Amino acid sequence: MTTTIEVKLRSIQRLAREIEAELNSGVHKKAIVRSSTTPVVGKMTLRDHIIAMKTRGFFRSPRTASEVHTELSKTYQCLANRVSVELIRLHKLKQLRKMTKQQGDRSKVAYVA
C-alpha cells in the first residue's frame, strides 16, 4: 500500500522529468528567466554584451553612454538610445553605479562597475 507522500513524490518526479525534457528540447526558451550574470548559450542580448564588457573590466573607469556605444559597435550593432536605456536599467538592478564625468566644460552621466 502506497502512502500519500509516495504518490506525491512520484508526481513531482514525473513533472521534473517533463520539465527537463522541455528545457532540453528548447521549446520554451522564452519562459526561462535568467539573471544578468547567467552565461548565455546562443544569441546574446544587449544586456549580455554590456555585462560581458563589465566582466572584461571596461567599466573600471567611468564610461558615458556614448563611449559604451562606440565600444559596443565593434561587436554588436544597435542604436545609441538603446544602450543608454540599458545602462539605466543595469543601474537600477545595481549592476552598475552612476557618477559624473567631466567632458570639456560639461558634466555627463557616466557608469562604473
Image: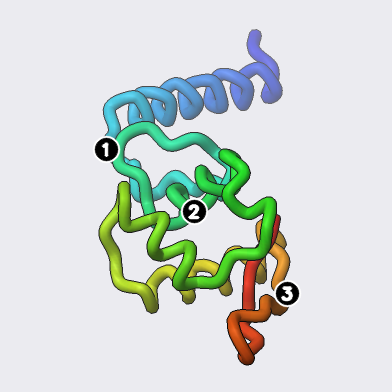
Compare residues 107 and 43 and report the one nearer the observer: 107
Dot 3 and dot 2 residues touching (CB under 8 Å): no
Q: Earlier in the sequence, mark 1 or mark 3?
A: 1
Mark 1: few, some, or many residues within 10 Å (few <14, many ≥20)? Answer: few
Compare residues 109 and 86 and report the one nearer the observer: 109
Mark 3: few, some, or many residues within 10 Å (few <14, many ≥20)? Answer: some
Q: Earlier in the sequence, mark 3 or mark 2?
A: 2
According to the picture, the residue beneath numbered tag 3 turns out to be 99
Instruction: Provide the secondary structure element on which disc 3 rests.
Output: strand
**What whole-number distance in Å separates the C-alpha atoms at marks 1 and 3?**
42 Å
Q: Where is residue 35 in the image (x, y as percent from the top left)?
A: 57, 47
Q: What residue type is labelled 3?
A: Met
According to the picture, the residue beneath numbered tag 1 turns out to be 27
Location of residue 43 with respect to 62 vertically, above or below: above
Instruction: Provide the secondary structure element on which disc 1 rests.
Output: loop
**What whole-number distance in Å separates the C-alpha atoms at marks 3 and 2?**
17 Å
Direction bottom: furthest residue: 105
Q: Is residue 39 left or right of residue 30?
A: right
Compare residues 9 and 85 and report the one nearer the observer: 85
According to the picture, the residue beneath numbered tag 2 turns out to be 50
**What whole-number distance in Å separates the C-alpha atoms at marks 1 and 2?**
27 Å
